[in-house]
Amino acid sequence: MNSRISSRLFGLFLLLLVLEAVATVAIFFYFAGRTGIGILALAATCAGMIALLLSIPLATATERRITERLGRVVAFARRLASGERSVRIAAGPREDEFTEMEAALNRTVERLEAEFAELEGGRQELATMLDSMQEGVVAITRDGVVRWSNTVMQRLAGTHVHPGRPLVHSLRDPEFLACVRGALERRELTFGRATSLAPGRVFEVNAAPLSSGGALAVVHDVTSIEAAQVSRRDFVANVSHELRTPLTSIQGYVETLIEDPETSPEMIHEFLGIILKNARRMNRLTEDLLALASVESPDYKLALRPIRASSLVHDALQSVGGIVVDSGVTLEVAGAPDDLVMADSDAMNQVFGNLVENSLKYAREGKRIRVGARKLNSEVQFTIQDFGPGIASEHLERIFERFYRVDKARSRESGGTGLGLAIVKHIVQAHGGRIWVESELGAGASFQFTLPIAQLAV
């Protein structure tokens, strides 16, 4: 195309020169014939022919220069159309109309490049913000094809969610698809609840229509929220159940005493003893509930300081010595290292007290409880072991849950609230330690927990 344009320009330029030369020769011959000045006419003719001959190279050079300038403009336009935004036109050697056009084109490209950079920066910033969200986000075209999705959605659905793939081929949850379909077809905000996006997890889904005709779907993981709600309902039910039993007992015996004024002193004394026992059980439950609420609170603070593991065991056993003596069970000390651990002594007394008291419920058959500690790599492991009937394997993973009892009848008979081990677990974890239980039926149970060794500044 450039060669056609330049050829036409060059031909037009030559045609003008030839016409000019012919006109010049004709005029001079005309006047020469009338005036008889032949030599002058011949000289003029020669001058015109010389001018014509000199004009041809000049026209060729001009044509070549114009063609080169136009070629650079066309090449610039093609590179710009292909998406190469950094392209520029080299300035010509002289100031002319072409130079002004090239400068204007360069300024236009610079402005477009700046606008593209700003748009790309905004797009990347938006993508970063969407990727940093806790929710999964996916954009769908009006035809139901995935347009874009953030990393959370890709993690939930694996590698199936990617641009250009139909959404129904990527996600098969019916509630999720129904929400998206509602936003696409009815052009309204829709809500739903998806349970099959990821195994064992529950998601809230909302889909909103977009002005382009597509839709934007957002999924929020509410598994922990629903689990907390279930846990809260179970907690309230368990507390109500634990309170109902002693309250019913107290109410029944008090009503009996009120309705029967002829009750013998011995019977009154027996009833009052039962009432006192149930009142103490309710008081113990209230104290454990307050203790559990305290250790589960985000504001729970420990007064940590370096304490020798041996001293920690000795002090804890002194605080529980009274209840052990009254039970007739022997308390054995298996030894403990002198390494310093970071611990809150009052909290550790509560841990040892709850674990020893729990072991007493099952140690009467073995008649002894062994307490000791040993050093591991960067922590000290403490052990409270009884020699009772042991715990079945199906109970081991749940034994530290609130209100969970292995033997409900024996636990209630002994006055247990079902919260002691849950309190112990939270206190140990607040120290940065671990707690677990090992047991075999007929061989007793061993409760073990760790505390980190103190790192003292040199």
Image: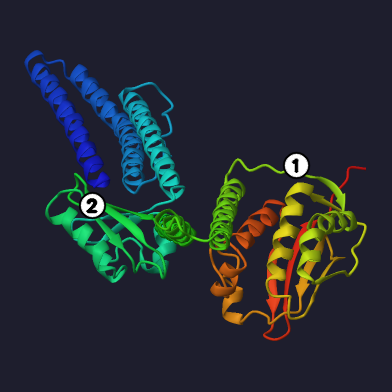
At 54% across and 72% down in the image, what residue appears?
A: 408
For residue 358, what is the image quadrant?
A: bottom right
- The percent position of residue 430, horizontal first and vertical second, equals 67, 51
Residue assigned mark 1: 303
Q: Residue furthest front?
A: 262
The residue nearer to you, when weighing 214 against 400, is: 400
Residue kind at label 2, given as amino acid type: Ala
Check the image and report above or below for 68 versus 137: above
Q: Position of residue 366 (x, y in %)?
A: 77, 80
Q: Is residue 353 left or right of residue 109?
A: right
Q: Determine the residue located farthest toward the left in the rendered image.
A: 34
Looking at the picture, which amino acid does disc 1 mark?
Ala
Label 1: few (<14), some or many (≥20) within 10 Å? few
Q: Dot 2 corresponds to which residue?
A: 215
Gap in Å between the C-alphas at discs 1 and 2?
54 Å
Residue shown at the point (36%, 63%) measured from the top left: 162
Residue 267 or residue 448, whichever sits in front: 267
* Position of 278 relative to 169 (above/below): above
Camera-near label (1 vs 2) is: 1
Who's the residue at 45% across and 45% down the image?
A: 128
Secondary structure under badge 2?
strand
Q: Secondary structure at mark 1?
A: loop
Q: Position of residue 309 (x, y in %)?
A: 87, 57
- Which one is nearer the viewer's eye here, 125 or 3? 125
Q: Is residue 217 above or below residue 161?
A: above
Mark 1 touches mark 2? (CB < 8 Å): no
Q: Residue furthest top?
A: 35
Rendered location of residue 173, percent (x, y): 29, 68
